[in-house]
Amino acid sequence: MTQSRETLLVTLTGPDRPGVTAALFTAIEAQRAEVLDVEQVVIRGQLILGVLLASVIAGDLALAAHRVADQLGMQVSIAPGVDVDDPRRRGRLLVTILGAPLRPHAFAAVAVCIAEQDGNIDSITRVASHPVTAIELEVSGSELDRLRTSLALTASANRIDIAVQRAGLRRRGQLLVVMDVDSTFIQDEVIELLADAAGCRPQVERITAAAMAGKMDFRTALEARVALLSGAPAEILSHVQSQIRLTAGALTLVRTLHRLGYHVGLVSGGFLEVVGPIAAKLGITHFAANGLEVADGRLTGRLRGPVIDRAGKAAVLQAFADELGIPLSRTIAVGDGANDIDMLALAGLGVAFNAKEVLRDVADTSVTQPYLDSILFLLGITREEVEEASIAEDS
């Protein structure tokens, strides 16, 4: 006669130290139990170990678990378990929260919002503690677009950043991160630095503002601004190169991505004469930008080559992905203005970084923290991995 089996969930909690897991599994081995599932987490030295077991002698198994807990000075709870995967866990989502600081009321607002969208928080993990606090929640039972829209309002109301994306294999393997340059990867607008050197900055700034707000066709605005540089000595290009300031965290972002085997690209509506040296210095081999025509040692006020505008940026992202053999679902695009809209829409994850409202409205997520390396945390890369990459680079 076949004996029926009971399924039990054994949860052991208390101070963590070496040997706890070994002691529990050694004790239950004698009870002819079958391990169905195991989850363990350590929070600030406190262990929570959950084991789902099937056994024909459940009473003896429970006694064995209690003896182990007494020996270790820990607490144990035993409850009936279910050996059936929860269908809600299919189609899981990852919700990443960034805050500096992250307040309890903000975290509560996120949890309430998830519950209102029929979501269940299955696990919570801290990804980083500085320069921002980054917390990742694994959520089941909610629909991506509805949750993303709802949490965008929560983020705005609580002054935090929230990204919602699908969990699973999408976050494994090769990634391609393509970034806009001016006011994203660097702090400056190169055309304005050139205009400053050429003595026409006020006129150029007015055109730039209209273009970035989506009120003026980018190509028309670009050509109008470049025309104002006509006659300026070509030496201003090297002068501007020396003035460029990387955005905080840009170097860490590139170094970490490269160390993890990911690909980085730069695409700019700015100028190849400035973007090229930046890319070369950082070991970035994929970059594209507009070219400035020079004749007799002076800028002609004209562009050379195809113009990289809003549509051009999306085409560059596609070209980089095709060359590297990376599907668009595994691309991340980062930008700040209207001419980045098509690129962010095409990418698997579009990130608006300290962006204009016109881009925030269409991006998958918006980052308002001033640190570009915060994007790493949206990819599930932990602060520890960032620091390991830094140590490896310096050694």
Image (cartoon, rainbow, N blue to C red):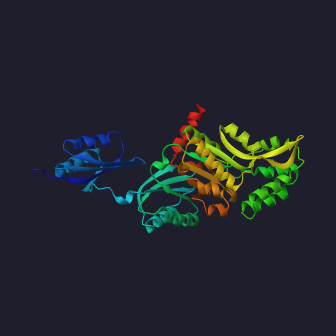
- Where residue 241 appears, as percent x and y from the top left, is 77, 42
- In the figure, is residue 261 to the left or right of 53? right
Quarter of the image with the C terminus is top right
Q: Farthest residue toward the bottom?
A: 116
Horizontally, residue 362 falls left or right of residue 305, namely left
For the residue pair 126 and 215, the one nearer the viewer reads as 215
Seen from the viewer's position, the closer of residues 225 and 336 is 225
Left of 173 or right of it: where is 58? left
x, y (%) of residue 221? 79, 58
Q: Foreground residue, 100 or 249?
A: 249
Residue at 55% across, 39% down: 261
Residue 243: in sight, yes or no?
Answer: yes
Considering only vertical position in the picture, is 225 above or below 249?
Answer: below
Residue 245, position as x, y percentages in the image: 73, 46
State the image coordinates of residue 158 (x, y, percent, origin top left): 56, 64
Left/right of residue 43 with respect to residue 145 in the rendered view = left
In this view, the residue farthest toward the top is 395
Say how many tags the image has: 0
Give the residue at x 55% y 53%.
Answer: 348
**Residue at 15% across, 53% down:** 4
Q: Is residue 95 visible?
A: no
Which residue is more in the foreground, 161 or 165? Answer: 165
Q: For the point 69% across and 37% down, which residue is it?
A: 281
